[in-house]
Amino acid sequence: MTRIVHVNGSFLPAAEASLPIMDRGFLFADGIYEVAAVLGGRLVDSDAHLARLDRSLGEIRIANPHSAAAWTALMEELVRRNAVEEGLVYIQVTRGAAERDFGFPPAGTEPTVVMFTQTKNILRSPQAETGIAVVTVPDLRWKRRDIKSVALLAQVLAKQAAVEAGVGEAWMVEDGFVTEGSSSTAFIVTADRRLVTRPLSNAILPGITRVAVLRLAEEAGLTVEERLFSLDEAHEAAEAFITSASSFVMPVVRIDGTPLGAGKPGPLARRLRELYIAEARGPA
Ligand code: PMP
């Protein structure tokens, strides 16, 4: 099946899509992206993803080219044209193409919009059954990690460290504390069953899945603590997991080669994954 992408207002086959080499996304990573899940052909939590897109664009002063309603229509159309049942929708907006110059381009330069879909087994991921191992790496990123910028070099290198170690994710560590995964939010469960994740700040991306999982945990009567946790504390945790639009809730069973707790997915991680999936599926 021909993959259909969206570029600056047009739907076209991916092989026919092109962008100017002067696009600032390419030259400066001067742009923002979003990724939302698709389940049963329907978008998951897309309003929250679009709100984060709008905020990220505002923080770097790119005018949002579409209303939330227009974005939603574009996403739904792309999902339909690619017949995606389960997977992801990717959106990228850059400051557009102009003669290369670090300062902003001349007024009137239009942002570049690129969208595509990816098919992915999120529900029946074998890793969800076994859990994943993580390795830790220093967090080498800039100081505005709350902005979902396409400047992802530190995360590319972090994820490659995980790939080369044969594990599923890299946790980034700063001053002895875990910030987050290369493309996920990090959680631990303490021995007395408190759920711990880092509070929102400029140091981490405000995960959309994170918000939903914290709410589901509170509704299920769990004690939630939004606070820093150290790598030492993570090693002593009863359970750990990551969350993201592309993995939902994924149990973590080893950190830097050391098994966590029982070395298999913990009951709270499993329960929160089930609750999240039930909600993401929406009313039948
Ligand atoms: N942190 C980082 C650094 C990420 O790249 C992601 C994935 N977008 C997340 C957290 C998880 O965010 P979300 O739940 O919105 O996918």
Image (spheres, helix red, strand yellow):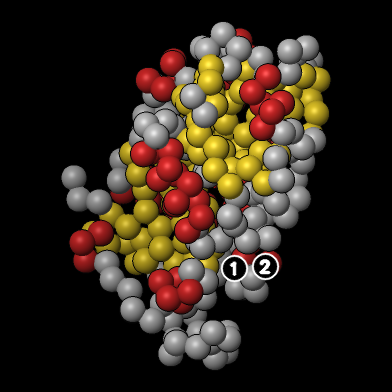
Residue for point 67% across, 46% down: 174
- The image shows residue 146, relative to residue 227, as above or below, that is below
Q: Position of residue 258 (x, y in %)?
A: 53, 21
Along the line of sight, the residue nearer the viewer: 85 or 232: 232
Disc 1 versus disc 2: nearer the observer: 2
Q: Position of residue 173 (x, y in %)?
A: 63, 42
**Quick check: 182 left or right of 203?**
left
Residue 217 visible at all: no
Circle 1/circle 2 CB separation < 8 Å: yes
> In the image, what residue type sits under mark 1?
Asn
> In the image, what residue type sits under mark 2?
Gly
Along the line of sight, the residue nearer the viewer: 89 or 248: 248
Q: Position of residue 85 (x, y in %)?
A: 36, 34
Along the line of sight, the residue nearer the viewer: 242 or 222: 242
Distance in Å between CA atoms under marks 1 and 2: 8 Å
Mark 2 burial class by Cα count in 10 Å: few <14, some 14-19, many 20+: few
Residue for point 51% across, 62% down: 151
Q: Which residue is mark 2?
A: 58
Earlier in the chain: of badge 1 and badge 2, it is 2
Q: Which residue is mark 1?
A: 64
Q: Position of residue 28 (x, y in %)?
A: 48, 74
Element carrying mark 1: loop
- The image shows residue 111, relative to residue 282, as above or below, that is below
Element carrying mark 2: helix
Residue 16 position by quadrant:
bottom left
